[in-house]
Image (cartoon, helix red, strand yellow):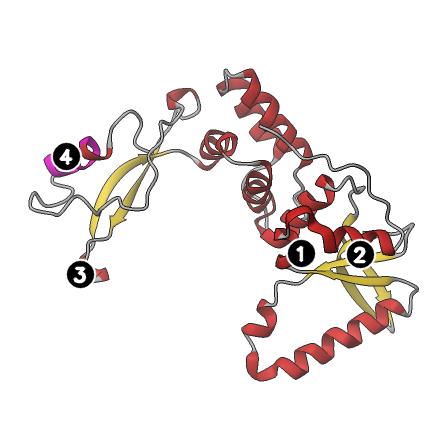
Amino acid sequence: MTGSLTPEDFLRRAKESEAISADSTTSRLLQGFDIARHMGTALDPDPETARLPLPHPGQSDDKLHHLPLRVEPLGACLVDTLPRLPFADATVALEAVMSRFRKPAPLASPELLELVEDGIKSQRKRRYLTQLLQFASSLSESPGESLTRVRLHELGIVQPDQQVELEADGKRFRVDFLWEKAKVILEFDGWMKYRNHASSFDQTHKQEKLREDALRSLGYSVLRVYWEDLMEPGCTRLRKLLHRHGIPSANPDAHTR
């Protein structure tokens, strides 16, 4: 984000400050980067300083130019950026920060709500951010799980419990999503555990089957959802899968900006 500066003015100032050499080819330095006005000092009373590496065609990594920049703190950056994103994308980004994948989260909803109240003047953006914060969960452990929650909500499905631990055959298993009343477990599978360990695919697959057998022995149905299901227009397969296992869906409740 360059404030009100155009890409040309931004790069001109970088040259004037000798952050990049005067003879650098500027036309490609910011190629692929969108330019947007940020919300200014209301959300950013104490800007931080970072050094942004600027790639240059044909330049090795150890000779990158580094441009010193004032940057927004994480909370201000989120409140500044999330209103620009569709609901699904914003939820994925927000839950990643709130959860930090089950490590101590750097930010929580109350802190972000305070930033919204103090720094956002637009009522539309405040409503949208408040809606995001009310929906977001700190229990999602991956972008796939976050997007699964969004798709369930869009289909009108009651949100399941997350990261529930169940005991079977003397072992404890944590499941991604659980509807206890319907006795249905839903797991997001991005296939990465298989791709990262191609040589041990059979062993990984065997462990997954044994895990599911143990969970089914408790009376649960175990369903799997994949990226393809989440990206399918209308989520037809996911809708049918949930309906077939007794989890009713209502009319889609898609979010609008």
Say which residue label 3 marks.
58
Q: Secondary structure at mark 3?
A: loop
Image quarter of residue 114: top right
Task: Between label 4 and label 2, give the one nearer the viewer.
Answer: 2
> Which segment is the magenta one?
9-17
- Across and down, in percent, residue 204 comes to 66, 78
Residue contact between numbered discs 1 and 4, judged by CB atoms under 8 Å: no
Q: Work out whether mark 2 precedes mark 3 in sequence or the reverse, and give the earlier one.
A: 3
Give me the C-alpha separation between circle 1 and circle 3.
40 Å
Q: What residue is shown with label 4?
A: 12
**Residue drawn at 56 percent across, 47 percent down:** 96
Q: Amino acid at mark 3?
A: Gly
Residue kind at label 1, given as amino acid type: Asp
Report which residue position mark 1 lands on.
229
Residue 84, compared with residue 193, is above or below; it is above
Indicate which disc, 4 or 3, sits on the residue closer to the N terminus: 4
How far is disc 1 from disc 4 in space, using C-alphas? 46 Å
In the image, residue 211 lies in the stretch drawn in magenta: no
Q: Position of residue 73 (x, y in %)?
A: 42, 35
Q: Position of residue 131 (x, y in %)?
A: 65, 28
Q: Which residue is mark 2?
A: 241
Identify which amino acid the numbered label 2 is placed on: Leu
For numbered disc 4, what is the local secondary structure? helix
| Of the image marks 4 and 2, the number of the one nearer the N terminus | 4
Give the residue type at disc 4.
Arg
